[in-house]
Amino acid sequence: MNFKERGFTIGDLIILLIVILFSFFIINKIKDSKTQKQITNLYQLEIQKTISNYSRN
């Protein structure tokens, strides 16, 4: 049966909703991971600066 002839069904809408929600959570997880990595890198950089300044004195 051709998709244009039968139109959208409830099953099609549920599948579309699941795909959209799954994509939303995956994108948020990736963004959180990048943010956490940036915070960790900044923290490590600050530690290195502190150690460098401490060893100079």
Image: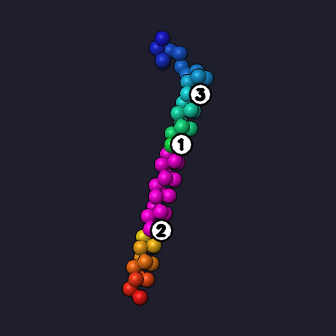
Lateral position of residue 39 relative to residue 11, left or right: left
Crowd around label 1: few <14 · some 14–19 · many ≥20 (10 Å): few
Three-letter amino acid code at disc 3?
Answer: Ile
Q: Report helix, strand or loop for mark 1.
A: helix
Tell which circle, 3 or 2, labels the residue nearer the N-terminal end: 3
Residue situated in front as seen by the camera: 51 or 17: 51
Residue situated in front as seen by the camera: 56 or 13: 56
Tag 2 near tag 1, CB within 8 Å = no
Residue 13, relative to residue 30: is it above or below?
Answer: above
Q: Which residues are magenta?
A: 27-44
Q: Position of residue 11 (x, y in %)?
A: 59, 22
Tag 3 near tag 1, CB within 8 Å = no
Residue at position x 49%, y 45% from top?
Answer: 27
Tag shown at residue 24: 1
Residue at the farthest top position: 1
Lateral position of residue 13 relative to residue 37, left or right: right
Residue 50, relative to residue 27: is it above or below?
Answer: below
Q: What whole-number distance in Å separates the C-alpha atoms at marks 3 and 1?
A: 15 Å
Tell which circle, 3 or 1, labels the residue nearer the N-terminal end: 3
Q: Report helix, strand or loop for mark 2.
A: helix
Tag 2 residue: 43
Q: Report helix, strand or loop for mark 3.
A: helix
Tag 3 residue: 14
Q: Position of residue 23 (x, y in %)?
A: 51, 39
Residue 50 sits in which quadrant?
Answer: bottom left
Crowd around label 2: few <14 · some 14–19 · many ≥20 (10 Å): few
Q: Position of residue 14 (x, y in %)?
A: 59, 28
Q: How is the image coloured?
A: rainbow
Residue at position x 44%, y 64% from top?
Answer: 41
